[in-house]
Image: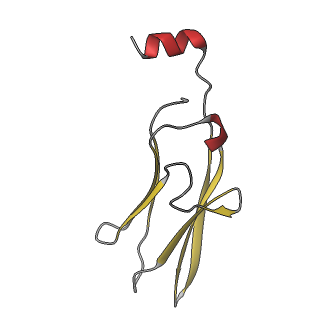
């Protein structure tokens, strides 16, 4: 829902430690992208994109690309953001 925190996650098993890249609609996500943060925990292999306050424009296809000297792998998902109506907005903040 619009305004909620969204976390996209994938799990990576690779050696040596890979380069991780997240894309939205073909565009590389960067730290400047509206507060989105990318986190990689090499110990657990979990890779996250966190959006603390999702907006309608955050909806789209996201792709995680993992690369090291042995090759490349990727996965993708589609994120849908439900618009918050005025009534929902009032109830959300009460």
Horizontal side of residue 22 vs 45, given as left or right: right
The answer to which image quadrant residue 57 occupies is top right
Residue under the point 71% across and 62% down: 26
Q: Work out which quarter of the rendered image holds the N terminus and state it.
A: top right
The correct choice, above or below, for 12 with respect to 67 in the image is above
Horizontal side of residue 5 vs 71, given as left or right: left
The correct choice, above or below, for 8 with respect to 19 in the image is above
How far across and down, in percent of the image, does residue 59 sit?
A: 64, 42
Q: Work out which quarter of the rendered image holds the C terminus and state it.
A: top left
Of the pair 88 and 47, the residue shown nearer to us = 88
Residue under the point 45% across and 79% down: 18
The residue furthest bottom is: 69
Of the pair 49 and 33, the residue shown nearer to us = 33
The number of callouts visible is 0
How far across and down, in percent of the image, does residue 24 sit?
A: 64, 56
Residue under the point 55% across and 9% down: 87
The residue furthest right is: 26
Residue under the point 46% across and 10% down: 91
Horizontal side of residue 5 vs 67, given as left or right: left
The residue furthest front is: 32
How far across and down, in percent of the image, does residue 33 sit?
A: 56, 54
The correct choice, above or below, for 81 with respect to 16 in the image is above
Check the image and tell me how it is coloured: secondary structure
How far across and down, in percent of the image, does residue 81 sit?
A: 60, 34
């Amino acid at each position: 829902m619009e305004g909620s925190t969204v976390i996209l996650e994938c799990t990576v098993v690779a050696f040596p430690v890979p380069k991780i890249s997240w894309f939205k609609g073909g565009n590389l996500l960067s730290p400047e992208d509206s507060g989105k943060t990318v986190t990689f925990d090499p110990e657990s292999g979990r890779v996250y994109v966190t959006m603390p306050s999702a907006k309608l424009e955050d909806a789209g296809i996201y792709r995680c690309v993992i690369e090291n000297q042995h090759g490349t792998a990727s996965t993708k998902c589609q994120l849908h953001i439900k618009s918050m109506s005025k009534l929902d907005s009032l109830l959300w903040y009460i």
